Image: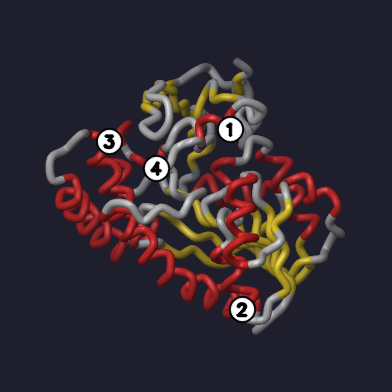
């Protein structure tokens, strides 16, 4: 199998010596084990020897992986979808406030089944949507009439053609990390904003669960960004961090999944309790939130 072997840290460029931070299990598709390594120089965490993008597709082929499906089966999934509906409004407000625009040109990369892109279209935005999964693109077309392009279409877009670019829990999946940052910089207007949401491996719940933290989600998540690491990546590629926001609901969902992965009895109750403790921790230190939203501007 083709694998992604990291010998040079994508962030600091220093040689990597194979320091293992965690050994995690793929609970969603295969049951295989993958190591998460940490760069000794800059602290960046990444999944070592993950399947290359040419063969990783089968690791997404599970009805449980609801980022790319629309199942409402089970209480955990129903909560996920309720939170998603609430967060659509919050995301739209964040876009409007930071861009200063009530409508404009928006590029949503990794649009999944199209809920956010459709929501922003309804708000009057001109939306371009990109998604790798053919099944997700078909869902967006059938349910929303949304024309979603494959990733190859990014190369055809004009530089400086977007006021806002969003990647909601997508950056951690993208194999060509530095190339993606460079592409985002080119596509964004001078006054535009880049919004990224990613899991936070320095969060309260990540530290509580360790290798069993569900948001490590190996091997689908290749990269694991702490707030410090994310800021460094932005600076490396010509961006400055404008705002940093916690995503408090993620702790509940991720904790429930983590308990389920552990095989815990009363996984829902235990997950809610840890999620509540994580939420309390993020009230005083937002950088301990389970997931973070980063708003970047060009320098």
Residues 254 and 130: in front is 130
Residue 176 vs 186, above or below: the answer is above
Give percent across and percent down for residue 14.
62, 26
Identity of the residue drawn at 64% across and 35% down: 175
Q: Mark 1: which secondary structure?
A: helix
Quadrant of the rendering where the C terminus is positioned? bottom right
- The image shows residue 245 at horizontal and vertical percentages of 45, 65
> Separation of disc 3 and disc 4 at Cα?
12 Å
Task: Specify which label sits upstream in the sequence, 4 or 1.
Answer: 1
Dot 2 or dot 3, earlier in sequence = 2
Mark found first going from the N terminus, 2 or 1? 1
Look at the picture and state if 125 lies above or below 294.
below
> Which quadrant is the N terminus positioned in?
top right
- Local packing at callout 3 (Cα closer than 10 Å; few below 14, some 14-19, many 20+) is some
Q: Earlier in the sequence, mark 3 or mark 4?
A: 4
Circle nearer the N terminus (4, 2) = 4
- In depth, the one of 157 and 195 nearer the eye is 157
Residue 143 in sight: yes
| Residue that numbered label 2 is attached to | 122
Name the residue tied to disc 3.
261
Q: Under tag 4, what secondary structure?
A: loop
Q: Look at discs 3 and 1 and give the one toward the viewer.
A: 1
Do the CB atoms of the residues marked 4 and 2 lie less than 8 Å apart? no
How many residues crowd around disc 4 within 10 Å: few (fewer than 14), some, or many (20 or more)? Answer: some
Mark 3 secondary-structure assignment: helix
Residue for badge 4: 64
Q: At 67% across and 27% down in the image, what residue appears? A: 54
Q: Nearer the viewer, mark 2 or mark 3?
A: 2
To which residue does mark 1 refer?
A: 57
Is residue 43 left or right of 192 when viewed as pictured?
left
Q: Give the Cα distance between marks 2 and 3.
A: 37 Å
């Amino acid at each position: 199998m083709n694998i992604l072997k990291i010998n040079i840290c994508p962030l600091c460029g220093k040689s990597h010596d194979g320091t293992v931070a965690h050994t995690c299990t793929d609970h969603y598709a295969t049951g295989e084990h993958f190591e998460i390594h940490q760069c000794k120089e800059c602290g960046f965490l990444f999944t070592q020897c993950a399947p290359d993008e040419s063969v990783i597709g089968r690791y997404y082929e599970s009805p449980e992986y609801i980022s790319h499906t629309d199942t409402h089966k089970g209480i955990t999934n129903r909560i996920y979808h309720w939170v998603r509906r609430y967060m659509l409004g919050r995301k739209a407000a964040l876009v409007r406030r930071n861009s200063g625009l009530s409508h404009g040109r928006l590029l949503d990369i990794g649009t999944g089944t199209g809920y956010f892109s459709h929501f922003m279209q309804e708000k009057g935005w001109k939306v371009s949507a990109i998604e790798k999964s053919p099944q997700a693109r078909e869902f967006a077309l059938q349910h929303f009439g949304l024309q979603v392009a494959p990733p190859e279409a990014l190369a055809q877009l004009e530089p400086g053609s977007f006021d806002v670019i969003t990647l909601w829990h997508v950056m951690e999946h993208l194999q060509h990390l530095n190339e993606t940052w460079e592409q985002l910089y080119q596509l964004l207007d001078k006054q535009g904003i880049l919004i990224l949401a990613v899991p936070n491996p320095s969060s309260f719940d990540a530290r509580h669960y360790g290798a069993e933290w569900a948001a490590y989600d190996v091997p689908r998540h290749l990269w694991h960004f702490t707030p410090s690491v994310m800021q460094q990546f932005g600076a490396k590629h010509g961006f400055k961090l404008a705002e940093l926001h916690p995503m408090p609901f993620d702790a509940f969902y991720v904790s429930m999944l983590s308990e389920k992965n552990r095989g815990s009895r009363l996984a829902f109750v235990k997950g809610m309790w840890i999620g509540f403790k994580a939420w309390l921790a993020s009230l005083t230190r937002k950088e301990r939130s389970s997931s973070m939203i980063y708003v970047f501007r060009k320098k």
